[in-house]
Image (spheres, rainbow, N blue to C red):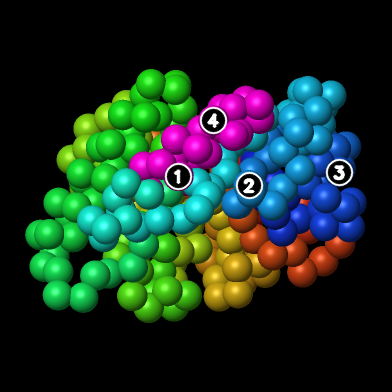
Amino acid sequence: MSAVYQLSTCIEWQFAEAGDLAARLRAARDAGFDLAEFHLWRDKPIEAMAEALADTGMRLTSLCVDPRKSIVDPAERDAMVAAVRETIEATAILGKPNLIVASGFRVDGLSEEAHFANAVTALRAAADAAEEAGVMLLLEPLNTRLFATMYLVSTKLGLDLVEAVNSPNLRLLYDIWHSAVMGEDMEAVLSGRIHLVGHVQAADMPDRNEPGTGTLDWAEVMRTLRAVGYDGAIGLEYFPTMPMTQSLDQSRRMLAD
């Protein structure tokens, strides 16, 4: 059966045997991918990656704003917006991919209301920069297993922030693994709000490996994505546990209709 969703390979963790990220893009294209994504950009061969994208016709779905700065700490707000602007400028040659923003850590002594208000202010300024450049920002909730004091570890809260900022250039990145770590009910948190989601990433529980290697019911995951109306790409943001050809074949089976 054919896959409903386009799949995007996370070349940060996949195709490592090919070499640097430019070489991984070429390997991913040879494996049948049209889409790819990675994390931070400052230590990456950006110009070589731009050449690889042009040669292969591939497209980047996302990369991370670098450096990572807090959206809830007022002392970092200017640096956060500057990081967004610099990332937009530096990665434009990669085709203006979506740019991922994390929240940063909680600020001691700050109320929930103040955290939320600070986040909205920072994200609105960042979204203004994204609108000017024609770029989409993706706000990503993480989890407390990896980041005990991270502010944004809730899909609902992330969607509330996106809704409050009310910019066409800010959407949520829904990571199935982070959400599962936090014990969220996928259908409950996404129903009626999928228009606020710009990208989905997938990995299995508990160890963030290929779909089908852990405890998640992928038939139910895919049913839920269809039921809530998601129609974008799915990023394979997982650590492979088997040779890439086998790993990708399994992922494609698990994420097929």
**N-terminal-most mark, 3 or 4:** 3
> Which-is-in-front pick, marks 2 and 3?
2
**N-terminal-most mark, 4 or 2:** 2
Residue at position x 32%, y 46% in the image: 78
State the separation of the CA atoms marked 1 and 2. Answer: 12 Å
* Place of residue 112 in the rendered image (x, y in percent of width and height, measured from the top left): 13, 65
Q: Viewed as shown, does residue 167 lie left or right of 232?
A: left
> Which-is-in-front pick, marks 4 and 2?
4
Q: Viewed as shown, does residue 55 lie left or right of 186?
A: right
Q: Nearer the viewer, residue 190 or 63?
A: 63
State the separation of the CA atoms marked 2 and 3. Answer: 15 Å
State the separation of the CA atoms marked 3 and 4. Answer: 23 Å
> Which structural element holds mark 4?
helix
Q: Residues within 10 Å of mark 2 (few under 14, many from 20)?
A: some
Query: Which quadrant of the view contains residue 115?
Result: bottom left
Residue at mark 4: 89
Badge number at residue 41: 2
Give the quadrant of the N terminus: top right
> Which structural element holds mark 3?
helix
Residue range in magenta is 80-100
> Which structural element holds mark 2?
loop
Residue at position x 52%, y 39% in the image: 87
Q: Amino acid at mark 4?
A: Glu
**N-terminal-most mark, 1 or 3:** 3
Query: Which quadrant of the view contains residue 226?
Result: top left
